[in-house]
Image (tube, rainbow, N blue to C red):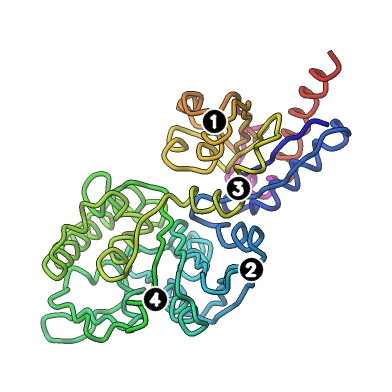
Amino acid sequence: MRKIVIAPDSFKESLSAREVAAIIAGALAPLLPHTELLQLPVADGGEGTLDALLDATAGQRFQSMVRGPQGDMVKADWGMLGDGVTAVIEMASASGLALVARSARNPLYSCSHGTGELIRAALDHGARRIILALGGSATNDGGAGMLCALGLRLLDDAGQPLPPGGAALARLARIDSSTLDPRLAGCQFDIACDVDNPLTGPHGASMVFGAQKGADAAMQATLELALSHYGASLTAHCGRDIAAVPGAGAAGGMAAGALAFLPCRLRRGIDIVLDACGLDAALQDADLVITGEGRLDGQTIFGKTPIGVARRAKLRGLPVIAIGGGLGHDVAAVHEHGIDAVFACIASVGTLDEALSQAPANLARSARNIGALLAMNLRR
């Protein structure tokens, strides 16, 4: 019997990784009746990481009411893995873009406080290791909100706490870390990070990712100045140039805040997830791998799920097909990193909202066509 491993990421804002894997398998099954279709939904450290890791380890899901990116209360999921001591927290669950309507997105004021509240909840539950999955954030506050929820005090020149949001960091005069939750010192943090961007500069958090969070050019400039001042303040307080660390700009600079005040290490999110999900074992007797994400383009090669899956597949000489909701003009770059063929789901010109709403049908059609090609090959 042939075996196909289906290991996709989510299609952001439309389908979870589990839904993507199920749709692909459902479309292939009638055409490939004698093929094992192993569904292994994965993630790269952004949305979907919690689901992937809980599924892989028989973990337990929890919910907490926390402060969302705009200050309103939101219900956020987090989890404990099967080992009972490792917590998984997705920043997106508490501080994510999906929690804010497009018309209301404003990273000048959005805050990561809710992510810190989830960390507190995990500590209350006895966590001694925390996997913090970055990605999909609505915030550009350098993790300041998260740290303040954990006891850090960021003060202006009058000794008053700064208001929420990235713009306020320009007024930072003093950092008081004496009130940080003491339990943090005994907890190891693995920061799942899928980018190498520094905190500031042309490749930093504000200039690269600010626009997708609702920032126009003027707002990006404001945030850049604020994070530059924040980065300098972190360096003065910690004695380490946090801002320049590759990956410090991830999730609006959340990684920079974590590096400055949490006992942590940055790891490729895809490696954390693929190790926990047992991808290597699943590939041992496979014949083909199908992966994918919402958009395949030149950025996919920088730590995204399809490339992480493809690299491990190529270690075993396996062919890899990737399905994307859409393809960028520079998608050919993925062929140099282990992906043999790419397929786009979108069949006609339309709006983004139309593409998102039609994602299940578009994906099923693309997967069905791939299955037909594979079936023809088997009949030869």
Q: Amino acid at mark 4?
A: His
What residue is pinned by disc 3?
11
Q: Position of residue 190 (x, y in %)?
A: 41, 61
What residue is pinned by disc 2?
59
Establish if 125 lies above or below 303.
below
> What stretch of residues is rendered in magenta?
348-359
Q: Earlier in the sequence, mark 4 or mark 2?
A: 2
What residue is pinned by disc 4?
113
Q: Quadrant of residue 361?
A: top right
Q: Amino acid at mark 3?
A: Phe
Of marks 1 and 2, the one in the foreground: 1
Label 3 SS? loop
Q: Position of residue 25 (x, y in %)?
A: 77, 42
Tell me what residue is drawn at x 16 percent, y 61 percent.
240
4 and 1 marks in contact (CB < 8 Å): no
Q: Quadrant of residue 82?
A: bottom right
Tell me what residue is drawn at x 82 percent, y 24 percent.
375
**Mark 2 burial class by Cα count in 10 Å: few <14, some 14-19, many 20+:** some
Tell me what residue is drawn at x 29 percent, y 55 percent.
248
Q: Earlier in the sequence, mark 1 or mark 3?
A: 3
Q: Earlier in the sequence, mark 1 or mark 2?
A: 2
Establish if 211 lies above or below 137.
above
Q: Is residue 358 magenta?
A: yes
**Quarter occupied by the N terminus:** top right
Q: Amino acid at mark 2?
A: Gly
Q: Position of residue 280 (x, y in %)?
A: 60, 42
1 and 3 marks in contact (CB < 8 Å): no
